[in-house]
Image: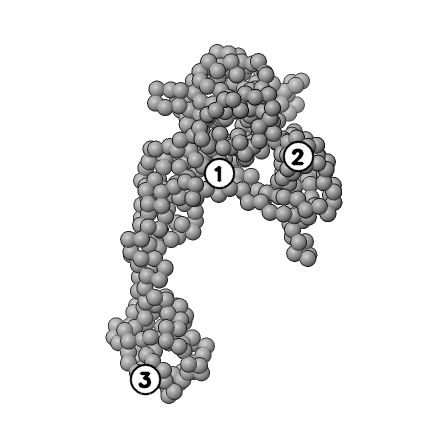
Amino acid sequence: MTTDICHQSGLISVELAREQLLEAIAPLSETETLPLDQACGRVLAKPAQAQLDLPPCDNSAMDGYALCGESDTPLQLVGKSLAGHPFSGAIGAGECVRITTGAPLPAGADRVVMQEQTELQGDRLTLNTAPKTGEHIRRRGEDVRSGETLLDTGAALKVPDIALLAAAGVARVTVVRRVRAALLSIGDELRSLDTPAAKLGEGNIYDSNRIAIKAALAQLNLDIVDLGCLPDEPRAIRDGFLAARESADIIVTSGGVSVGEADFTRTVLEELGQLELWRLAIKPGKPFAFGHLPRESGRALFFGLPGNPVSALVTLYQLVLPALEKLKGVSDEYRQPPIQCRARLLNPIAKKPGRLDYQRGYTWRDCDGQQVVRSTGVQGSHILSGFSRANCFIVLPREGGNCDTGDWVTIEPFRAPLV
């Protein structure tokens, strides 16, 4: 990690911060082999290869009748082919076999006619249309060939991937082990949720950031070690970080490490490892810390999020998530960057140049099919109610200013873990 940019007096862009994070992180190397039905969301450590052709045989794409060649006269029905119960013989000219979707094509058949385009009287079938050679037939191996690499190392397995691998006979996969994340909060003002509101002292607040971060990370297939809330006391903080360092790959906190802030958290972190403090050119979320705590077997990465709740979630989403993808072993080919699109703004937005602004908005398509978006109201970094009503970020450029009703703006619809 370069330090000339990290320690400069100005603000750094979120793009540069993201790039530096990714450069500083190496993917996990430990692997495990799992049954396929336990592997959704995991990242392949070895390629997955098909064990058979898909389809495994020529089969029918429709309910209807399999036949051989063209015919202007009624056909003789000689049997049926059902899924799991194929027709055992062969058919010739002037013959047909009743066939259902997915059933093997009988030997000799070269086309299938839909049942809606036929009339059956007894065992004689009249065609109301003339099917072409190969019509309504799925050919063996037209989707997948046996031995073909279906998904390569670094693929994060999605539900359609699980379906593909299961159909291709892949029963077990080798994946990167889960990332272990340690969460902790630090602050004498913080109280747990089991404290009744009436018993909160003056200046006390609920430890909500840790709860929200835990909920977000739980959606990302991580093993979470919740170390709770620590008091503002050097020995307790040091013991907490030592425990986190030994039990996890990453440590996530919020608050207490702002640039220029002299507090116990920062002192302990600098004593135990390397800490970089950044002032980001984004809003909300200017203060952000990244570093690592060495240990006997490698190191634990540290992410220090801002203390304001909206700022903490925005920086988690924009910076920590890409870092986690790399740590989990997701290759560049399979990474899913946020999707941005354009929308018509339905209310004016005030903005000062200088920082990339992730305002919270709600977007939909209006009755004319046009993508529109409106702000969810007051945009303070402490306003969680507006964040709760949002389904996207309104992304306003760093050097941009105020926006008017009717302007086209960039939006970034939420994806996991904000949905």
Can residue 62 be seen by looking at this rendering?
yes
Helix or strand or loop: what does disc 3 sit on? loop
Query: Residue 278 lies in what quarter of the image?
Result: top right
Residue 46 shown left or right of residue 16 in the figure: left
Name the residue that disc number 2 marks: 399
| For marks 1 and 2 on the same chain, the one whose residue lies earlier in the sequence | 1
Task: Look at discs 3 and 1 and give the one toward the viewer.
Answer: 3
Residue in view at x 64 percent, y 25 percent? 197
Relative side of 403 to 235, left or right: right
Q: Name the spot of residue 110 as percent of width and height, x first.
A: 33, 75
Q: Amino acid at mark 1?
A: Gln
State the residue at coordinates (26%, 76%).
90
Which of discs 2 and 3 lies nearer the camera? The answer is 2
| Mark 1 element type | loop
Residue 277 percent coordinates (x, y): 54, 21
- Asked whether the beta carbons under mark 3 and mark 1 sit within 8 Å of each other, the answer is no
Number of other residues with Cα within 10 Å of mark 3, as a class: few under 14, some 14 to 19, many 20 or more: some
Image point (34%, 40%), residue name:
45
List the single residue furthest toward the bottom: 73
Q: Which mark is residue 130?
A: none
> Which residue has dot 1 on it?
219
Circles 2 and 3: CB atoms closer than 8 Å: no
Q: Is residue 387 left or right of residue 54?
A: right
For the residues labelled 3 and 1, the Cα–Cα distance comes to 59 Å
Which residue is label 3 attached to? Answer: 94
Could you say where residue 148 lies in the image, as x and y percent from the top left?
31, 53
Give the Cα separation between the discs numbered 1 and 2.
34 Å
- Visible residue check, residue 98: no
The relative height of residue 41 versus residue 149 in the rendered view (above or below) is above
Q: Is residue 294 above or below residue 364?
A: above
Give amino acid for label 2.
Glu
